[in-house]
Amino acid sequence: MLSKSRFVTGCQCHKLLWWTVHEPDAVELQPDKVLQDLFDQGRQVGEIVMRYLRDLDEVAFVRFASVYRQFNDVYDFFEELRPLLEDETRHQPPR
């Protein structure tokens, strides 16, 4: 399927688009060690942000999670929100 990001990639580099569509496991598409370490650090930062936002601001958490987790459907999104919805202490008005 041709997504917006694949279309933009294809405009920037036709060969890369061909590889991602026809040979997604090509060695040339795999990140090297340095790049993989950067991706891993980015994931760690994202997980830390998710942890802090969950307690700090529920709306910000939901907005960040919806982009960061790249949910495939509404059910995946609901599963991420289930712990927030089930925590009754969060829904009590302040005294």
Image: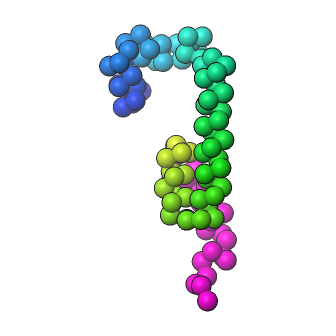
Q: Could you say where residue 80 lies in the image, as x and y percent from the top left?
A: 61, 55
Camera-side residue of 64 and 82:
64
Q: In this view, does 12 lie to the left or right of 63?
A: left
**Residue 62: image x %, image y %?**
52, 58
Q: Residue at x 59, y 59 (%)?
A: 53
Residue at x 58%, y 84% (from the top left corner): 93
Does residue 63 appear in the picture of this structure?
A: yes
Q: Which of 14 and 60 is in front in this view?
A: 60
Residue 82 can be seen, yes or no:
no
What is the magenta segment's predominant secondary structure? helix
Q: Residue at x 37, y 12 (%)?
A: 14
On the image, the x and y values in percent for residue 17 come to: 42, 17
Q: Which residues make up the magenta segment? A: 71-95
Viewed as shown, does residue 44 lie left or right of 61? right
User: Which quarter of the image is occupied by the C terminus?
Assistant: bottom right
Q: How many labels does the image show?
A: 0
Task: Quadrant for residue 4, please give it.
Answer: top left
**Residue 91 belongs to the span the image colors magenta:** yes
Q: Position of residue 57 (x, y in %)?
A: 55, 65
In the foreground, 40 or 71: 40
Measured along the vertical axis of the image, is residue 15 above or below residue 8? above
90 to 76, vertically: above or below: below
What residue is at 54 percent from the left and 51 percent from the top?
Answer: 65
